[in-house]
Image: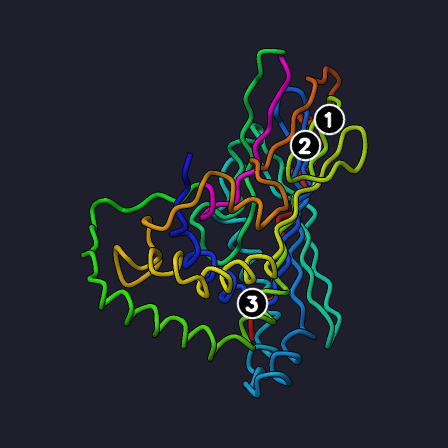
Amino acid sequence: MRRPLAWLLLLAVISMATGCLEVHQQFTINPDRSAKVRVKLAFDLGLLERVQAETGIDMKNEVNEAEATMRSLARQCIATATGVDAWTDYSMEIRPGESITVWMTAYVPEVTHFKLNPNNGEIPNMTLRMSRSAASEERWSVILPGLNDHKVNEEEPVQPLSNEEVAEVLAERRTQFDEESAESKVLFESLKITSALRFPGKVVKTTNATRTSRQEVTVSFEGKRFYAMMENILADDQLAPKAFRDGAELHSSLTLPGNQINAWLFGEKAPVSVTVTPGERALFDYEKELAIAKASPPPEFPEDE
């Protein structure tokens, strides 16, 4: 199996747009796949000061707008997330000069239908898939949109480039990468996407995930590993030209033997997956908690100044 690397550009845009954001999702999953997902979005204000100190770029405007940005991201989650019956427990904590953190909880009737940000926009997140093995075990796959799910738009074919054009585009991209490396590296180092999963059954096997207890695992994507991979690919005189062969941006022609990307990003040359024994006892009463959530007042967002 071979996988495209066209998602490189997409994820780079997501990271830069998100800036200093950490995304954490805590899944608590029942045997019927109903779940509650505690979402945390954390914005590192101190990192903006570091970007300014290391690059000389004025970040004062970003600092001033950080609170409004976080409220906007929270609204986006609540308005556009798919597979959600109700949102509750919204709160925001502001630590001047340090961080802005938003928490909220989603109740979802089918966890594999839940997407925090379905359009691959400003909030990167992980989604879940489940299948049953021959041994009646459940195999859960953890998907990072833009990495595992990228599809080339066949309605907009690109014009292949000549060798000379490829060399020219690659030289431009390498120069651009070098010029923006100080700012990009700092921002990528801050990007972290984590999913903590609690299952009703016992975890029997993991790949590219960390087992934290008998029933729990954590999957973490770190921007600094992604940045290092981009840096290495662009410096590789064999891989880099393939990235631009079918167009002026990274495209589907750059392929690697299956799971090499996961080896770079997560540590193992294997899918990101968790195998568990099916559980019979619910971890929480979905209908009862859903009723309470629906009866609670909706989140209040202060008006942006």
Q: Are marks 1 and 2 in contact (CB under 8 Å)?
A: yes
Q: Label for residue 206?
A: 2
In this picture, is 157 found above or below 272? Answer: below
Mark in the foreground, 3 or 1:
1
For the N terminus, which image quadrant? top left
The residue sitting at 64% across, 64% down in the picture is 190
Q: Earlier in the sequence, mark 3 or mark 1?
A: 3
Label 1 – label 2 distance at C-alpha: 8 Å
Q: Residues within 10 Å of mark 3 (few under 14, many from 20)?
A: many
Q: Are marks 3 and 1 in contact (CB under 8 Å)?
A: no
Q: Label for residue 203?
A: 1
Q: Is residue 285 visible?
A: no
Q: Position of residue 23 (x, y in %)?
A: 63, 54
Q: Nearer the viewer, residue 83 or 156?
A: 156
Label 3 – label 1 distance at C-alpha: 34 Å
Question: Dot 1 lies on which element?
Answer: strand
Q: Are marks 2 and 3 in contact (CB under 8 Å)?
A: no
Stretch in magenta = 136-148
Q: Residues within 10 Å of mark 1 (few under 14, many from 20)?
A: many
Q: Is residue 88 left or right of residue 235?
A: right
